[in-house]
Every structure is written in structure tokens, then in C-alpha cells.
Amino acid sequence: MARLTLLLAPLLLSCLLLNSRVDAKEYMRCQLAKELLLKYGINKTFLSNWICLIEHESNRSTKVVKRNPNGSASYGLFQISSKEWCRVSRKGGLCDKKCEDFLDDNIDDDVVCAKRIFERDGFKNWPGWSASCRNTQNLPNLGLACNIQTVRPTRSLRLNQKSNYYIIV
């Protein structure tokens, strides 16, 4: 009986892992840009910022989970943090979502939560944006690469330290 249990345990574990498999997606830059613009209504003014952020946070993959120095983790395409915005294994956080929900190929809930984060704090919650996309010269030229005519701000974004929002200067 013990021998049978030892043989069946790996089989059972494999079945459980296969049933809990998440279908993830890796986007091409132009495919993602067009989807964010047309399906999700991302403002053209910030579309290059969103693409740059996603490329530096998750490399356009919905399956990425990164551990953060503060003990939290960031999930999915937009790298949404479990510290404030979602909860592991249960609904919660300011987006009222399970963090694992951000790891599948359906990005509807990811976009809703990312927009909520942006509306509250701008891009400052994303280290990839702060390090690599804050300078508008580093943003991808989606007009040239994807034939999407974006509206580029003629000025740069600056974080107002007192009230945590971005202003155009």
C-alpha cells in the first residue's frame, strides 16, 4: 500500500499542477499598443508611457511575478503590487482583486487596476517607468514602429512632491 501511495503521489501532484495552470500571454509591442488604445481606451497622450512601463516591468508578459524588497510581490503585465493593490489567494486591496488574476491572458482586470493606480498616483508606483521612461526621449516612437499617431507631450511630466500627482511643465 505504501508503495502504491508513493507511485500515485507524483501523478496526483502533476494533475493538480496541470489543472491550476495559468494561460499567460506574451505580447508584441504593436499588438499591445493597438489593444490598449482601441479595446481599453488608453489615452494616446500616455500610450508610449504605458508601453515603455510594460516593457521595463514585465517585458510584455502576463506571467511575470517579481518579489519586492519590502516582502510584497508584483504581478502580471503591469506588475501590480500585492502591498496595496491586490491580495494573494483572495480578493482584496484597492483594486479588490486576487493578485493571481493578473497572471492570465485576459488583461481586462489588469487594465482596470492599472488605470486606477495611474489615476491615483500617476506612474510613480512603477520603478521601471521611473528608471527608464520618465525622460520622454526614452519613450518608444509608436507612430514609426506601429503606425499609431500618438500625441506626445511637448513638455515633461514632473511629480508634485507635496500632493503626489503629475503636472505638465
Image (spheres, rainbow, N blue to C red):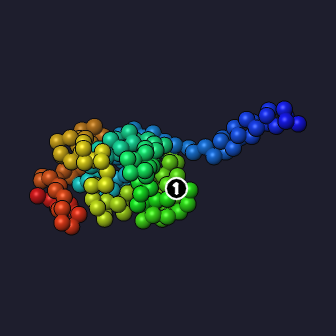
Q: Residue at x 49, y 59 (%)?
A: 87
Report whether 95 appears left or right of 33: right
Circle 1 residues within 10 Å: few <14, some 14–19, many ≥20: some
Residue 162, percent from left and from top: 18, 66
Nearest the camera: 3 or 57? 3
Report whether 133 appears left or right of 117: left
Report whether 144 appears left or right of 22: left
- Quadrant showing the N terminus: top right
Q: Residue at x 52, y 48 (%)?
A: 104
Q: Amino acid at mark 1?
A: Val
Tag 1 residue: 88
Q: How many marks?
A: 1
Q: Residue at x 43, y 44 (%)?
A: 66
Residue 5, percent from left and from top: 82, 37
Residue 10, percent from left and from top: 73, 35
- Quadrant showing the C terminus: bottom left
Residue found farthest to the bottom: 163
* Image quarter of residue 141: top left
Nearest the camera: 15 or 1? 1
Q: Report helix, strand or loop for mark 1.
A: loop
Nearest the camera: 130 or 28? 130
Residue 55, percent from left and from top: 34, 41
* Image quarter of residue 137: top left
Q: Is residue 63 visible?
A: yes
Q: Is residue 148 visible?
A: no
Nearest the camera: 87 or 105? 87
Q: Residue at x 21, y 48 (%)?
A: 134
